[in-house]
Amino acid sequence: MIKFFRHIRKQLLTENKTGKYIAYAIGEIILVVIGILIALQINNWNEERVARRSEQKLLMSLLEDFKSNLASLESSLNEIPNLIEEYSLVLEHAGRINNGLSDTMKADIIVTGFIRTILVDGTLTSVLGSTTLELISNDTLKRLLTSHPARLRDFKESENDLIDYVHEVQRPLFRSYINLSDFLLDEPRFDEFIKHVEQSDYESLLKNREYLNSVIGIRSINKDLLNQCRELYEHTREISLILEDELKN
């Protein structure tokens, strides 16, 4: 092809057709420019296709993590109200202590639990800690992803504060009055063992001001945590829906 063009240029110069030669040269330059532009466009298409493929893989990984978190948050949203009710029963029984405590009431008082929500953020942390975020073309999604770690951090800190409070304050007070052998009452094989251990003192436990304050505190913290859980769930769900739409498109 190059030899062919050279032959034409040489022929035009030989025949002294300068005007035609200049026109031909300009045309040849235009063809070269067009060829370069086409090559650049093809390269851009290839790069765009690779970028979109990488974006799809990234969105799928993010969606997997966010769906996992949605399931965990939904579980906590169902369990935290039950825990709040259990601590409420402790306070109700404390108010009726002068009337005596039934076995059912004593069973209600054995509450030292908390909810731990398992949340994953490995993919999101990796994305925000690198230039990978630029692969995401949806600006709204990028904004929501950028603000999500702060919400996760606040929720985890609140949950960890509650767990520490239960371990460090409520449970030591609880063990001062309640023998853990009471957890074995429904297992006949331990009847003889239970006869030889110090009996639990539920009445004194429910009269202990510090213990009752701890129960009130745990109940209050759980109510606040429940609100945080709802907000985090909604934010996580919003991001999940956008991720699903982006993958469909």
Image (cartoon, rainbow, N blue to C red):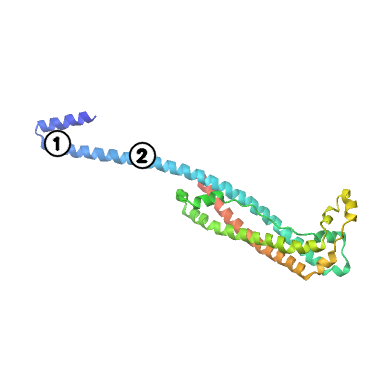
Disc with the residue nearer the chain's start (2 vs 1): 1
10 relative to 147, above or below: above
* Residue named by callout 1: 21
Let me know if residue 184 appears in the view. yes
Badge 1 crowding class, 10 Å Cα cut-off, few under 14, some 14 to 19, many 20 or more, is: some
Q: Residue at x 50, y 47 (%)?
A: 246
Q: Is residue 134 left or right of residue 162?
A: left
Q: Residue 54 appears at what percent x and percent y?
A: 47, 43
Q: Residue 227 appears at what percent x and percent y?
A: 64, 62
The image quadrant that residue 180 belongs to is bottom right
In this orientation, which residue lies closer to the viewer: 75 or 15?
75
Q: Residue at x 30, y 41 (%)?
A: 37
* Count of marks overlaid on the render: 2
In this orientation, which residue lies closer to the viewer: 207 or 52?
207
Q: Is residue 5 left or right of residue 166?
A: left
For the residue labelled by badge 2, is the local secondary structure a helix, a strand or a loop? helix
Let me know if residue 136 appears in the view. no
Q: Is residue 123 left or right of residue 85?
A: left
